[in-house]
Amino acid sequence: MQATMQSDVVKHYPVLLNELISIITPQYGGTFIDCTFGQGGYTKKILSYQNTQVIALDRDLESKKKADKISKEFQDRFIFKNKKFSQLDDLKLKNINLRGIIFDLGYSTTQIKDPKKGLSFNSLGDLNMQMGLNDFSAKEVINRLDEKDLEKIFKFFGEEKYAKKIASSVVKQRSIHKIDTKSLVELIEKTKKKKNFKIHSATKVFQALRIFVNKEITELIYGLIAAAKVLKKDGILAVVTFHSLEDKIVKYFFKSLSENKSISRYVPKLDQPTTLLKLESKKPIIPSQKEIEENLPSRSAKLRYAIKKEDFYNFETDIFKKFEHLIEIENFSKKL
């Protein structure tokens, strides 16, 4: 995941905002869920249309400050919950007519630059990476998991070519002293002798650690399933991704439920529709050149969406089996 917006005191850039609004059409009113509230860009735009309501979620408690301001402005049309989006089912939304559910899987520049979170290799803060409602930090991961586990995390979550060498270097160095942000970056740069001028040497390892610490794979899968459950017929599920791994998961989920795999175990086979979701296009929507020039982190964004065809709450999906190897890696956290 990359930053979804360039954040400073004045300017805020929700990625693919116009494209998203044209898909979910809040001008016709209705209730929407913003599963990744962040700086509130999508939420404020939706609420600018009359007869709309937004239920917003975010695991990062820092987002509540922004949410409180929006709450004062829109009052009973806005509800904020400090929850992970995998906890959608906890909100008892089964009987609410939801017109759209939105996921923006990126991180804001505000979050990346926050030294308390320790997300960035440029950060002076602790090697943390906890976005909220976490059980452990990146510092614990890097200093406690064994070499093979670290190698798999770097390889599969960061797509890091030098995963084995970096994991080996980590284990050697931590036997001398605990690894922090600065020493980890230096270790990676020393191990990866060939420079990549497109991205920093530590980018992929830091991405991998952040995914692992926040269980982003499991969170995304449970979040998508919960969203598809509570969404009503003709409702829209829209997801903005920022790296190939999460886009692969979203793409597979949409594809599998728009084919003959969305069979409910609670309905007789003869009465079942062939699919749960409808795709208007198999190709993702990407930012325009103009948007990329105004907000460089948007360059890797992809927006995919699907329309729910039937009012099923329960359905079957093989997504857990498909990405079982990634979930198993996230379960290394049980060793901490």
Image (cartoon, rainbow, N blue to C red):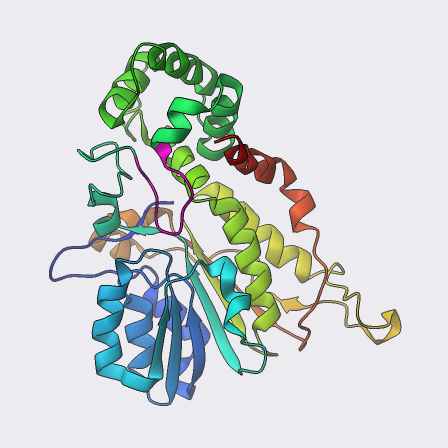
Residue 270 left/right relative to 258: right
Residue 31 lies in what quarter of the image?
bottom left
- Height in image: 296 above or below 183? below
Which residue appears at 40% of the width and 46% of the height? 134
In the picture, which quadrant includes the N terminus? top left
Counting from the top left corner in percent of width and height, residue 125 is at 20, 35
Residue nearest the viewer, comparing 133 with 233:
133
Q: Is residue 304 visible?
A: no
- Height in image: 31 above or below 197? below
- Which residues, given as a range, are shown in magenta? 128-138
Residue 219 left/right relative to 262: left
Task: Judge whether residue 79 is colored magenta.
Answer: no
Task: Judge whether residue 132 is colored magenta.
Answer: yes
Q: Main secondary structure of the magenta part?
A: loop
Residue 267 left/right relative to 253: right
Which residue appears at 33% of the width and 40% of the height? 129
Q: Is residue 164 visible?
A: yes
Counting from the top left corner in percent of width and height, residue 59 is at 38, 57
Residue nearest the viewer, comparing 329 with 196:
329
Counting from the top left corner in percent of width and height, residue 216 is at 47, 46
Counting from the top left corner in percent of width and height, residue 7 is at 19, 55
Residue 281 lies in what quarter of the image?
bottom right
Which residue appears at 61% of the width and 55% of the height? 253
Which residue appears at 53% of the width and 82% of the height? 96
